[in-house]
Amino acid sequence: MSTKRFTGVMPPMITPFTAEGAVDYAAFTANLQQWNEDALGGYLVNGSNSETAYLSEAEKLQLLRSTVKNAKPGRHILAGTGVESLSETIRFTNACADEGASFALVLTPCYYQSSMTSSALIDFFTRLAEKSRIPILIYNVPKFTNVNIKADAVKTLAAHPNIVGMKDSTGDVPQLASFLAATAGQDFEIMVGTVSAWFPALTLGIEAGIHAAANCAPNACASVQQAFLSGDNERAIAIYQLLLPLNTAVTATYGIAGLKYAASLLGYSGGEVRCPLQPLNNKQKQELAVIVETAHQGLKELGIRN
């Protein structure tokens, strides 16, 4: 296999909104400049945690432009480009390529979920890869799509020279291992899409992760890998265990509103969510603040900032 393209942690960057519901580009850029000082390997713009389903195409492209303009040199810039139809995905993927995206992260089509068989997904991604001017990454997130791509489809797609990897956000470690086995020997990289599977993924040989929690705790997420690679499994596990309650809170329990509030508590600009998502109530804010503070203090004792 060739040299790894992807190493380290990337945030699926949150999109701050104003109280009136407009994209707060200044806050977005301020976050990016702060993340430039954190231990990250790259950025994902217009991912699930970016509220991309609620963004217009013009907003998505402007967020990408801001990322390209302000990202620290040498860091990968991934753009979420998947929409339901093949033709629109091709068009938008190439529009993002024109704006400077390095890779396209493409959601599995899902509206007609019962028809999204392995053969349908193979056809979609193969035809997209033939027309895309940048390399394609498969995005598997059944939590939102109710479509879970199978290892047989991933094996077939991994053979395509312009399909170079995937983000698996299931948190299913046995399935992660099946993807690795299916693509062994291919020039194809699997990234884990949730902190809940981060340490197990590292032990399986995965070298990169795109984590919601990296928006608010980027250095802690990165430190799990740093400790693991240095051979200090005890430290890696300690950091990982401190991150787990925080990760659950900003994903499953409180969702994107919780992620944004946690980011605000930890020094980033969370901003508002966009309707129909709802902000946290006061009780939820108090509960989340306790979880954030507990994680923050534990990480601080280990010498980790966020």
Image (tube, grey):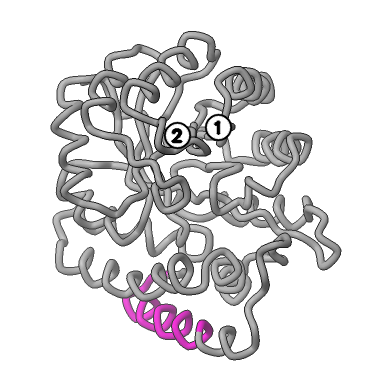
Q: Earlier in the sequence, mark 2 or mark 1?
A: 1
Residue at mark 2: 108
Residue 13 in percent (x, y) is at 58, 51
Q: Quadrant of residue 184?
A: top left
- Residue at (52, 65) in percent of width and height: 216
User: In this orientation, which residue lies closer to the viewer: 194 or 8?
Assistant: 194
Residue at mark 1: 82
State the extent of the magenta-drawn residues as a range. Answer: 288-304
- Residue at (53, 43) in percent of width and height: 43
Residue 76 in percent (x, y) is at 50, 34
Q: Is residue 231 magenta?
A: no
- Residue type beneath disc 2: Thr
- Residue at (68, 21) in percent of width and height: 95
Q: Quadrant of residue 163?
A: top left
Can residue 229 be seen here? The reply is no
Disc 1, SS:
loop
Q: Main secondary structure of the magenta part?
A: helix
